[in-house]
Image (spheres, helix red, strand yellow):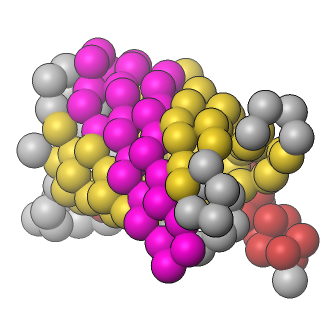
Amino acid sequence: MLKKGLIISLILVFTFFLVNFQVQAQAQPGSIGIGLQSSYAFWGSGGLSIIYDLRPDASIQGIFGIGARRQSIEGRYLYRFRQEAYWDGYAFGSAGIYSGPNTGFLLGGGIGIEYDIRGVDGTLPPISLNADIGGMIRDGLDDFNVQLRAGFHYRF
């Protein structure tokens, strides 16, 4: 089940990289996005996410994850290496802490894609959807997890 989901997600991410939408990019310096983002690993936690665009090609993101068994606070730096019409390809680095049955530190990184739904219809609200894949090291080098994440943000 996990391998099938991973393969489907990879195909979707790379398909979006090949598609060329002809509209305006969404990231504006100083803009903010508030929404939900799945939180680290496959433990089912998700939470509040806030993105602040430093430049059109760089953003910082805070994720406050709340799950039934774990909580996490994570910071991410997103670098948009490909900016197209209503979508961006990005790489990210992340660091954070978690608590639950155990407490520890997180480090990770990966690649993803962000899509502004106004590419479908210009009258839609400024909502962006994102999906990424990456790895997370938990508790030093003791535990490594591959992650698939998704989120959405309302942009101001």
The residue that appears at 89% across and 71% down in the rendered structure is 3
The residue that appears at 80% across and 65% down in the rendered structure is 6
Query: Could you tell me how many numbered marks the image carries?
Result: 0
Q: Where is residue 80 in the image (x, y as percent from the top left)?
A: 48, 26
The residue that appears at 85% across and 46% down in the rendered structure is 143
Q: Which SS type dominates the magenta stretch?
A: strand
Q: Where is residue 125 in the image (x, y as percent from the top left)?
A: 14, 63
Quarter of the picture holding the N terminus: bottom right
| Position of 103 relative to 117 (above/below) | above
Left or right side of 29 for 97: right
Is residue 55 found inside the magenta-colored segment of the image?
yes
* Residue 42 placement: quadrant: bottom right
State which region is magenta. 51-79
Quarter of the picture holding the C terminus: top left
| Position of 50 relative to 28 (above/below) | below
Left or right side of 9 for 74: left
Is residue 73 found inside the magenta-colored segment of the image?
yes
* Residue 73 placement: quadrant: top left
Can residue 86 be spotted in the picture?
A: yes
Can residue 85 be spotted in the picture?
A: no
Left or right side of 74 for 134: right
* Residue 123 placement: quadrant: bottom left
Q: Where is residue 93 in the image (x, y as percent from the top left)?
A: 59, 27
Please tell me which residue lies in front, 45 or 18.
45
Q: Position of residue 16 (x, y in %)?
A: 60, 52
